[in-house]
Image (cartoon, rainbow, N blue to C red):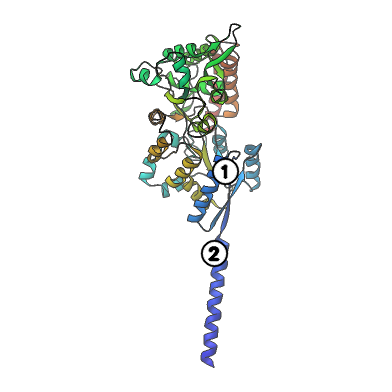
């Protein structure tokens, strides 16, 4: 009888241990919220497949996708203050750096130094990766945002049929001879812009977002907006190289009238010869929308005195500092930027991966195009210079207004517009620098 009781006790104890372990496992299971924009089948496929792959690797972590809706950026700030913000969020433009300065984002540097190997770091495009470092202010030195992908502004999509009809030599040969310069590009745009007898434009040479792509011209001339990252407080847009670039671009828009303010729509509709759209469209939407309507290819940006003017928009992932699960949130970010995570993104949405080792696979998606120009361009890409502005809430609107008055509406020359804001910006920089010391 005693042996029987001991046997029953052992069984009860074993059951108790199993129940305890089950309870502990359940208690350790966490749920993360990932905030990303939706709206396209490609994005939905990417998010769903990525979450499934991550959860398979991390059974104790559940990831819920929160679609970023209208006003989501302001909502994240408010929700962070209330302790109910998403754990991981996408970010872009200046606001990620603003969040970093305000303490809204977790410093990922300790995690990076602990988990990423030397091989990992060598597999990441340095200037694009380094854009996640805060180079000024009281929190300078923290690493707040890892790149989501390479959103390269470094090549044009162009309508092959239009160049053939205009009797123009393919860009490839011109560039190989070293003759694909700003002036050559200007002549191409003049010949590719078609007007009716009453001066109505029926075909544009270049379609590009005027409020954004002027930065590539400045960079291509050897100019800068600020001396980033060496001295982010030093304003440089009023220097000779930058002014020369802005005036050239303004001349294309208003003197030659060969440029239309277009992101990608008119190019997709066959009304624009060259498109300055972002790279995210090349392996994705362009193929779907254009189809066999016309033949298109990829051309490098024309060479300026400072190079081709290549930069990458600052699209990132960040961990909100109020997260209750920082270690698990980092595991998600680490997976999103891993080779496996970046391959999933590339295959589902056609975006260019931040991993150098995946470049051959990405180029294979564009194997029928002159995609080697993208491989060459990414080697010289810098971070979007307007996404790393010091005190962007004050400096950003001033710069945008100068571009509006010159490039967009032609009210004044580019030189006059920039010279008007230069002393104001330098005063703001002096204040910002003093506050950080």
Residue carrying label 2: 25
Q: Is residue 7 left or right of residue 170?
A: right
Could you tell me if residue 368 is visible in this image? yes
Q: Nearer the viewer, residue 3 or 290?
A: 290
Residue carrying label 1: 44
Crowd band around label 1 with a 10 angstrom C-alpha radius: few (<14), some (14–19), many (20+)? some
Mark 1–mark 2 distance (CA, rounded to whole Å): 30 Å
| Above/below status of 414 relative to 107 | above
| Residue 272 % position (x, y) | 53, 20
Disc 1 on helix, strand or loop?
helix
| Residue 128 % position (x, y) | 44, 34
The circle drawn on residue 1 is none
| Above/below status of 191 relative to 275 | above
Q: Residue furthest front?
A: 292
| Above/below status of 199 relative to 80 | above
| Residue 93 % position (x, y) | 55, 32
């Amino acid at each position: 009888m005693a042996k029987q009781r001991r046997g029953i006790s052992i069984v009860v104890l074993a059951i108790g241990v199993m129940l305890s372990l089950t309870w502990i496992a359940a208690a350790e299971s966490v749920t993360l919220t990932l905030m990303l924009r939706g709206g396209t089948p490609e994005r939905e496929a990417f998010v769903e497949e990525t979450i499934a792959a991550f959860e398979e690797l991390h059974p104790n972590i559940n990831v819920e996708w929160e679609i970023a809706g209208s006003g989501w950026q302001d909502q994240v700030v408010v929700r962070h203050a209330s302790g109910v913000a998403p754990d991981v969020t996408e970010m872009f433009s200046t606001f990620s750096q603003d969040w970093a300065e305000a303490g809204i984002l977790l410093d990922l540097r300790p995690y990076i130094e602990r988990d990423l190997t030397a091989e990992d770091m060598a597999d990441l495009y340095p200037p694009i990766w380094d854009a996640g470092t805060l180079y000024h202010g009281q929190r300078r030195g923290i690493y707040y945002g890892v790149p989501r992908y390479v959103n390269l502004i470094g090549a044009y999509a162009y309508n092959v049929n239009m160049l053939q009809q205009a009797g123009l030599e393919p860009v490839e040969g011109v560039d190989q001879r070293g003759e694909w310069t700003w002036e050559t590009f200007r002549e191409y745009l003049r010949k590719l812009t078609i007007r009716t007898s009453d001066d109505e434009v029926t075909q544009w040479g270049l379609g590009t977002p005027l409020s954004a792509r002027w930065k590539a011209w400045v960079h291509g001339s050897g100019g800068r907006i600020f001396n980033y990252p060496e001295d982010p407080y030093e304003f440089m847009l009023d220097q000779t190289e930058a002014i020369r670039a802005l005036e050239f671009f303004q001349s294309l828009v208003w003197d030659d009238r060969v440029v239309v303010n277009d992101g990608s729509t008119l190019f997709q509709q066959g009304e624009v010869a060259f498109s300055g759209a972002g790279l995210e469209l090349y392996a994705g939407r362009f193929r779907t929308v254009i189809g066999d309507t016309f033949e298109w290819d990829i051309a490098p940006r024309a060479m300026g005195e400072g190079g081709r003017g290549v930069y990458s928009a600052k699209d990132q992932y960040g961990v909100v500092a109020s997260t209750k699960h920082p270690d698990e949130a980092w595991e998600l970010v680490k997976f999103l930027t891993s080779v496996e995570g970046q391959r999933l993104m590339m295959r589902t949405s056609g975006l260019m991966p931040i991993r150098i080792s995946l470049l051959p696979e990405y180029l294979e998606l564009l194997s029928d195009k002159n995609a080697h120009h993208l491989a060459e361009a990414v080697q010289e890409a810098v971070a979007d210079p307007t996404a790393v502005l010091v005190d962007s809430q004050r400096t950003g609107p001033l710069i945008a207004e100068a571009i509006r008055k010159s490039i967009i509406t032609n009210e004044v020359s580019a030189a006059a517009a920039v010279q008007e804001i230069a002393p104001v910006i330098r005063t703001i920089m002096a204040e910002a620098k003093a506050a950080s010391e």
